[in-house]
Image (cartoon, rainbow, N blue to C red):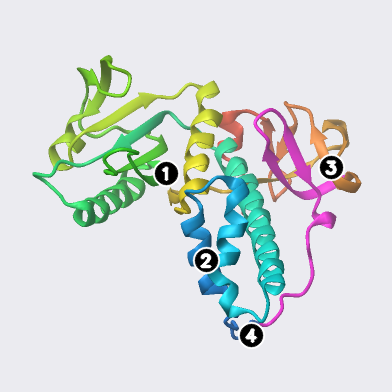
Amino acid sequence: MPYRNCKIYSDGGHYIAIPSENFSHGKKRSKSPIKEQPHKAEFETAYKNSQALPKKERKDFITEQIKNEFNSSEQAKQYVEQQTERKKTNAIKRRVRLFRKVHLQEWNYFVTFTYSNELHDENTFKKKLMNTLKHLVSRKGWKYIGVWERSPEKQRLHFHGIFYIPEMIGELKAVTDYDTVSHRKQTTYQNTHFLKHFGRNDFKALMPYDIDRSVRYILKYIEKSGERLCYGGKLPTYIKSHILDDDVLCPYGVANKKLLLFDDFTCIDDDGVVMGKASPEVIKNMPKCN
C-alpha cells in the first residue's frame, strides 16, 4: 500500500492525512525532574490579571508587575516578550488540536447549566455537575467539551458546552420567560432532571453549521479568562488508516508532508481490511488515536 498507517484529521471541510514517515519518531527522552522556572509564577499571576485590559496595554502591565524580579526593566521586558510568545504558540496548538477533535465527532446540543441558590452554592454546583456528567459519559455515552463562565454583570457561575447526547435523561420542556439582556420574551428548552437537581438550564439543538461558531465562543471565553476546557468522553484527534494512491488529491502543507484526500477516500484498518468509503458510519468504526 502506498501510504501505510496514516493519521487522518478533518479541518471541517476536508480530510488530511499525515503519512507515518512524517511522524516524529525520535527516541523518547528519559524524564528528568522538572526544574522550576524562575519568575514563572509571578509572570502567570500578572498575565492572568492583565486579561481584563486592552491587548495593547497588557505587556506593559505585566512588565510593571514583575520588573522588581530582574536587574533591569529591559530584562523584564525581554522576559515578558518570550513568555507571551510561548503563551501564543501554546494557544495556537491547543486551538488546532481542539478543532481536530471537534470535527471528528458528532455533536447535537449546545448546553448551558446554572444553579439555584436553594439547591447549591458554587462549590457544590461544580462538584455535583462534574460528577453527574462523568456518570453520563460512562453509562449513557455522552461526550462534551465545555468551560466554566461567569455572567458579565452578576458574575454568576455557569457551564457552557457542546454535547453529544445519544440518550437523553429527563425530558426537554419548552419554557417561555423574559430575557433581561435582549429585553424580549424567549423560549428555551429545559431538562427536567437538571432543573430538579441543579436549577436553570438550556438545551439548544446544534445544526452542523452551528458547531464551529459554538466552539469559537467557548475559545473566546477561555482566551479571555484563562479558564481551562473541560472534556468528557473519548475524543480522539485522528483516524488511523492506510491510504491508497488514488485517494490522494494532492500533497499539502509545509514541505508537502501531508496529503489532501478526496472526501470519499477508502478507509482501511490496521489489518488491511477495507471498511468502506469515508462516511460518518464508517469512520465511527475506524481505529483512532491522539
Q: Give amino acid for label 2.
A: Glu
Q: Secondary structure at mark 3?
A: loop
275 in relation to 254, above or below: above
Dot 3: few (<14), some (14–19), or many (≥20) neighbours within 10 Å?
few
Q: Secondary structure at mark 4?
A: loop
Dot 4: few (<14), some (14–19), or many (≥20) neighbours within 10 Å?
few
Quadrant occupied by the C terminus:
bottom right
Quadrant occupied by the N terminus:
top right
Is tag 4's residue or tag 3's residue first in the polypeptide sequence? Answer: 4
Is tag 2's residue or tag 3's residue first in the polypeptide sequence? Answer: 2
Measured Cα–Cα span from mark 2 to mark 1: 23 Å
- Labels 4 and 3 touching (C-beta < 8 A): no
Residue at image coords 66%, 81%:
71
| Direction top: furthest residue | 185
Depth check: give the residue in front, 77 or 128: 77
Q: Secondary structure at mark 2?
A: helix
Q: Give amino acid for label 1.
A: Gly
Dot 1: few (<14), some (14–19), or many (≥20) neighbours within 10 Å?
many
- Labels 1 and 3 touching (C-beta < 8 A): no
Q: Give amino acid for label 3.
A: Gly
Measured Cα–Cα span from mark 4 to mark 1: 33 Å
Residue matched to label 4: 32
Span colored in magenta: 1-30
Measured Cα–Cα span from mark 2 to mark 3: 34 Å
Dot 2: few (<14), some (14–19), or many (≥20) neighbours within 10 Å?
few
Residue matched to label 1: 146
